Amino acid sequence: MPSVSDGLRSSVGLRFWWRTFEGVQDLFAEGHGAEGGADDPLPFKTYRGLPRHVLPEPARRIGDARWSFEAFRAAHPREVPSLDALDQRTLSALLYWTYGVCRIELGPHAVWPYHRTVASARCFHPVELYVWLARPAGDLPAGCYHYDPAHHALTLLRAGGVPDAVRAATGVRADIGLLVASAWFRKTAFRYRDYAYRLCAQEAGMTLGNALLTAAALGLHGRVHQRFGDAVVNRALGLDGREETAFAVIDLTPAEASPPCAALQRPFPVAELRTLHPAHVQTNGTPSRAWSGLTTVDLAARLTGPGAPIAPDGFHLPDQAPDADGVLGLAGPEPGPGGVELAAALRARDSGGRMFLPAALPVAFDHVASALRYALEPVASDHTGAMCRPLVDAHVLMLGADGASPGLYRLDASSGPPALVRVPGRDWRAVLAMLCDRTPAVNSAKAGALVFLTAHRVAGERWFGARGYRVLHQEAGIVAQRISVLAAAAGLSVRVTNGYHDGMVRELIGVDAAHVPVFTLVVGRRRPTAQYEPQLTW
């Protein structure tokens, strides 16, 4: 069970769940900040007075997008790429394709000009990415670095390999190194106030998902750690733990390394590390008390120990008996290794433009199937000692896909080949009208499919305490990024939206209040618009 540092764990965690999911209007009634002025936070974190290392040009091809999926590796065991060390070019590719700037929007109406490989609300991109090299990468010394996407460069924060205190506080092996995803709350909270906690956790999850895809394409194994000693990791990176705090750690090891060990069950060590006070540029002066609820719930989620391995089955809906005429198989023919280039998919990935009006022509079901086939593949994490299916469930509302009858389906990946199992007797028209009304910038009625990701908030609270909120959002983010990237490889766009009525979606799916919708993904084919977003070239 979880171990946290104060008694706020259950009460604060549950209150924030309900305020976020069912009280979005109440949150915004408290007021929200304006954007577009000189006081906006900088779109990129920039340190001053510290050593900088410009990375080489990132590779334009890095490998297949499916190597992080257990089923795909098992089907092609002799072709799985493997890497046992990083050089600067591989490190450049890893960081760039995980969270780099891939497109810049130009023109007089370019209000959110910087587009990265991961979707972000209003392109605020509150996640910061750090890499800790266990040993030198070519001429780059071992040490802890911050990744600067604006200049594709690294800023050295702390020299030397991964300290024992960090290894003990995270449970990592760190054979090659670590990736750390943090949330710099101000970049989103200046506008969204307390609601920013949800957006930061979601984007952290999508960034983790992208890092796992990229690492595997390059020949690395990534294991996600979400139950670590916050104080130790924040101190190691020079983060204050309030304005910015570490959200997740990815342990990088060779692809052929032995399976990860079980989660530790002892208190985290006290970090005997030199305190860092790295200076970085700040422009926004909004006092952090404007998002005090966010800070309160985040501080309540601090851990003093990682707790026991979880029971994953308790997070999922029970299996349903499929109707013989209502099953759509997803495990159809697909290209072999090298047939789905990850870099090309990430270049193509987009959210459909500011006004997403999907093309009216139906999409091919095979394209939707390829986007969903691996969505719920197991992830290596510190939840259990083995690979663990993401702690979310997925339902798909098919609307305009050739070869699939309209209606609601559950994505079943619990046993055997993945499939969409029809959920009979569901009238989805009211939900579709609600989505169009709540998010007029997205015409959901023209979509090929809508994907609803839900999480079991009670199980999250039971196993993770207040930390369950961000853990389950990150789990859903991993799945959302998988769908977004594989949809892009099939020529489709995916729009992540939080604009929906929670109760109506739950009623459609047929779940009680313990199961909460975390994401809605609108899947369709983008039509040409006047939005000018040239891809970056090197």
Image (cartoon, helix red, strand yellow):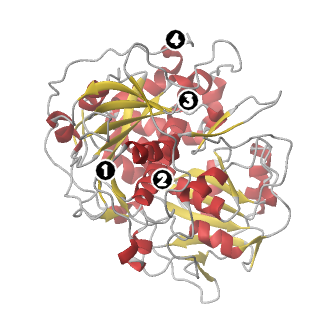
Say which of 408 and 238 sits in front.
Answer: 238
Whole-Å distance between the Cαs marked 3 and 4?
A: 26 Å
Disc 2 versus disc 3: nearer the observer: 3
Q: Earlier in the sequence, mark 4 or mark 1?
A: 1
Give the Cα distance between marks 1 and 2. Answer: 17 Å
The amino acid pointed to by label 4 is Pro
Residue situated furthest front in the rendering: 139
Look at discs 1 and 2 and give the one toward the viewer.
1
Mark 2 / mark 4, whichever is N-terminal: 4
The residue under label 2 is 478
Q: Amino acid at mark 3?
A: Ala
What mark, if any, has residue 274 been given in the picture?
none
Query: Disc 2 residue type?
Result: Ile
Q: Residues within 10 Å of mark 3 (few under 14, many from 20)?
A: few
- Label 1: which residue? 252
* Residue 483 drawn at (x, y percent): 58, 60
Compute the Cα span from label 2 to label 3. 24 Å
Tell me the mark number nearer the camera, choosing from 4 and 1.
Answer: 1
The answer to whether residue 62 is left or right of residue 140 is: right
Q: Give the CA distance from mark 1 to mark 3.
A: 24 Å
| Quadrant of the drawing holding the C terminus | top right
